[in-house]
Amino acid sequence: MNEAVRPDLSDLPGAVPSRSKWGHLPLVWILPLIVVIAGGYVVVHERLAQGITVHIRFHSADGLEANKTKIRYKDVEIGEVSGIRVADDRKEVIITADIQRNAKEYMVTDTRFWVVRPRISAAGITGLGTLVSGEYISADIGQSKIKSTSFVGLEIPPVVTSDLPGREFVLHAEDLGSLDVGSSVFYRRLTAGQVIGYTLDPGGTGVTIRVFVNAPFDSYVNSATRFWQASGVDMSLSSDGIQLHTESLTSILEGGVAFQTLPGAQVSPVAVDTSFNLYLDEDRAMRPTESEIRRFVMYFKGSLRGLSPGAPVELHGINIGEVKTLDVEYDRNRQSLRFPVVVELYPQRIRGKASKKDRSVAQTEDTEASSRTLLDTLVRQGLRAELKTGNLLTGQKFVALDLYQDPPLDRVDWNEQPSIFPTLSSGLDDIQDSVGSIARKLDKIPFDQLSLKIMATMGALEQTLKNADYLLQNVNGNLAPQVKATLVEAEAAMRNAKEILAQDAPLSGDLGSTLLQVSRAAKSITALVDYLERHPESLLRGKPGDSP
């Protein structure tokens, strides 16, 4: 059998096995790798979904629970409390909260947090919904661009939030009065804002009050705006009588602040947080600004009862000043007490306003003749200060300036600080001085000696009467000497009575009546003695015409 011819395969290319880069990894590891990748994706996605973690400090964690208490902004949930712990100093608690991813942009430095719970305040009753849903933390998003994760929570909820249109202003006052957080701010008796906070000034010299004025009322606050206390019922007792003011029923119940622009003043816009003075009442707040104020001291002789700080200084009924203080001082030179009344005068109110035609002339005159020269001139013409009663019902007094005819020479003492302004005693003071002078003269009358003299005179008259009666009952030959002796005693009694009546001093009505009766008795006795000397036989026969 012939062998088959086999083809030569040596020249054909050989098969080469391919090698994959994953060929070294066993198939058993593929599934775990997929699981790890999927888990990492889930973790990263969950982390990104959680947002950020923040820490909030509160005084206590009353009503707060981890993994239950929510954090809300405009009643929308933006986070949850994840942990609560006590701070290292043990003075506060630190709340750890997880903020959602879509709210992490809200966490800036001026963002505020507070716990919402039922509260009763001047602003009203808030947080009643938490009685059912439970307490939660509310947020007010700030305007800052700086991110933060650490905050200090508010113990009292803010009255206004940062998204409310309007502006804040600062008021300075001596005391808080009846104001509180939430008290209303009024403009022309319309509610225009609220009191949002207050603090005590360093050193305790006053209080600083922050108010928020809502838009569009904030546009009415300018450089000439005046703020005053509109709290409760403002009742004042002055020389004008009893005055009663109130802003509204709300201000009576919870207090408030009112503001208005000073009429006729030049105004300019003001920025946020501009400071203003808070006046006690509308009258003080709306007084025009005085370009010139001169302080004087006045010494009055009469009582200062009824005069109080704030009383007006008037010139013919026009207010040109105000009483500032009352005091007492000892004058070493005169060794007596004086009672200074310090007042502030506004000389420009006396000069008045110049017309447009004479404005340049008036300015020249004001430059050449100062208020000092003006007051000196008026004092030389008789300008004096006097205390007057402004209201008879209340007894309140005020200082009145007037030009008097021929007053005692005087001048303004500019060398003293404050300068001394000349005064006059009022008509009532003159009457009191006259009464005092009469009383001093009466004190000099020796009433004890007068009583002794009167008693001696009465005794002498009584003895004279006894002698006359004896003469009438016992007739004898020695009638003439006894009658003469009686006459001498009666004349002595009359001289004593005349000496008493001739005293240079007013006597009481009873004493005058007694002396008058004594005088009449003495005259009757003298007439009797004269008649007996002329008709001694009448002692035996009686008067002609008498019945036997």
Image (cartoon, rainbow, N blue to C red):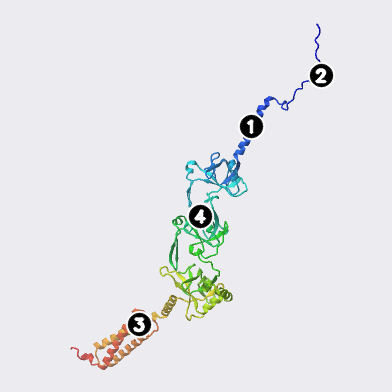
Q: Residue at x 67, y 25 (%)?
A: 28
* Disc number lying in front (2 or 3): 2
Q: What is the x, y in percent for residue 335?
A: 52, 75
Dots 1 and 3: beta carbons under 8 Å? Answer: no
**181 shown above or below 506:** above
Q: Which residue is mark 1?
A: 38
Give the alpha-carbon distance from disc 1 to disc 4, as whole Å: 56 Å
Mark 4 or 2, nearer chain start? 2
**What type is the residue that disc 4 sits on?**
Gly
Query: Nearer the N terminus, badge 1 or badge 4?
Result: 1
Tell me the residue that label 3 is attached to. Answer: 454
> Type of residue at label 2?
Asp
In which quadrant will I find the C terminus? Answer: bottom left
Q: Which residue is under mark 2? A: 11
Instruction: Name the residue that disc number 4 marks.
Output: 193
Pointer 1 or 3: first along the chain: 1
- Residue furthest to the left in view is 548
- Asked whether 235 or 355 is in front, the reply is 355
Query: Identity of the amino acid at label 1?
Result: Ala
Marks 4 and 2 sit apart, C-alpha to C-alpha, by: 104 Å
Q: Secondary structure at mark 4?
A: strand
Mark 3 touches mark 4? (CB < 8 Å): no
Q: CA distance from mark 3 to mark 4?
A: 85 Å
In terms of depth relative to the viewer, which is nearer, 476 or 26?
A: 26
